[in-house]
């Protein structure tokens, strides 16, 4: 995967950066840290400009976020509620009302969620789906997405610039952070699941 990413970026430059980041947002397992840190390193030995790389990466982030927002937009709360009203809801121990409760929470906390989740592995991509489902105002969604993504992209790209030829060591360390983030997400999901189960069992 790493070799393919490097090959694409070396061949297509800014366009390769934008395309890879867009794809990474839609398919989170693709490592953004490789794209961004190597992109920063490329500016040290090619004619590529670091700020244009940041712009290309942020454009890619925005495109990917819009695609996932659209997916969430098409899956309306009413559709999800109908699904949960059947066997799926019984298996997951969720009720149709839970969908609308989640929508209300996102409507009140959505700004913070969309912004801060851009710094969390996997979630930084997937947060766009509930934003679409909650019908978050597109202009606000894009502003928060661009600001959060630009900060994340800028940090990793400049780290790649300063690391130079040692950029792969940085990737390994960021990869460790991502793994810790994934573990934290799994723990959070398990804890929330247990709480929901215990609450419903007590009722």
Image (cartoon, helix red, strand yellow):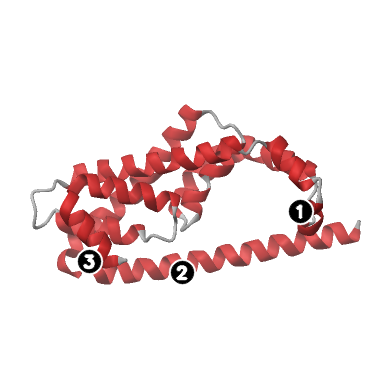
Instruction: Write the residue at 48% across / 34% down.
Output: 141
The part of the image, by quadrant, that contains residue 173 is: bottom left
Taking the image as shown, residue 44 lies to the left or right of residue 31, namely: left
Residue 65 x, y percent position in the rendering: 44, 42
Taking the image as shown, residue 99 lies to the left or right of residue 2, namely: right
Q: Depth check: 82 or 135 in front? A: 82
- Circle 3 residues within 10 Å: few <14, some 14–19, many ≥20: many
Q: Name the residue under label 3.
A: 167
Taking the image as shown, residue 76 lies to the left or right of residue 35, namely: right
Closer to the chain start, of discs 3 and 1, is 1
**Which of the labelled discs sits on residue 179, or is there none?**
2
Residue at the outermost right position: 203
Residue 124 x, y percent position in the rendering: 47, 51
Residue 119 x, y percent position in the rendering: 44, 53
Q: Name the residue under label 1.
A: 88
Quarter that holds the N terminus: bottom left
């Amino acid at each position: 995967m790493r070799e393919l990413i490097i090959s694409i970026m070396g061949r297509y430059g800014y366009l390769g950066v934008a395309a890879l980041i867009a794809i990474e947002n839609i398919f989170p397992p693709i490592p953004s840290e490789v794209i961004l840190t190597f992109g920063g390193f490329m500016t040290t030995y090619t004619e590529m400009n670091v700020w244009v790389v940041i712009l290309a990466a942020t454009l890619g982030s925005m495109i990917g976020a819009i695609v996932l927002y659209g997916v969430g937009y098409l899956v309306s709360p009413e559709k999800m509620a109908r699904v949960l009203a059947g066997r799926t809801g019984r298996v997951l121990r969720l009720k149709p009302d839970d969908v609308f409760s989640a929508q209300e929470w996102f409507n009140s906390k959505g700004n913070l969620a969309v912004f801060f989740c851009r710094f969390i592995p996997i979630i930084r991509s997937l947060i766009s789906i509930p934003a679409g489902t909650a019908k978050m105002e597109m202009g606000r969604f894009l502003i928060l997405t661009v600001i959060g993504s630009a900060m994340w992209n800028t940090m990793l790209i400049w780290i790649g610039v300063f690391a130079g030829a040692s950029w792969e060591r940085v990737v390994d360390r960021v990869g460790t952070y991502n793994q810790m983030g994934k573990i934290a997400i799994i723990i959070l999901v398990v804890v929330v699941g247990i709480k929901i189960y215990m609450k419903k069992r007590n009722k």
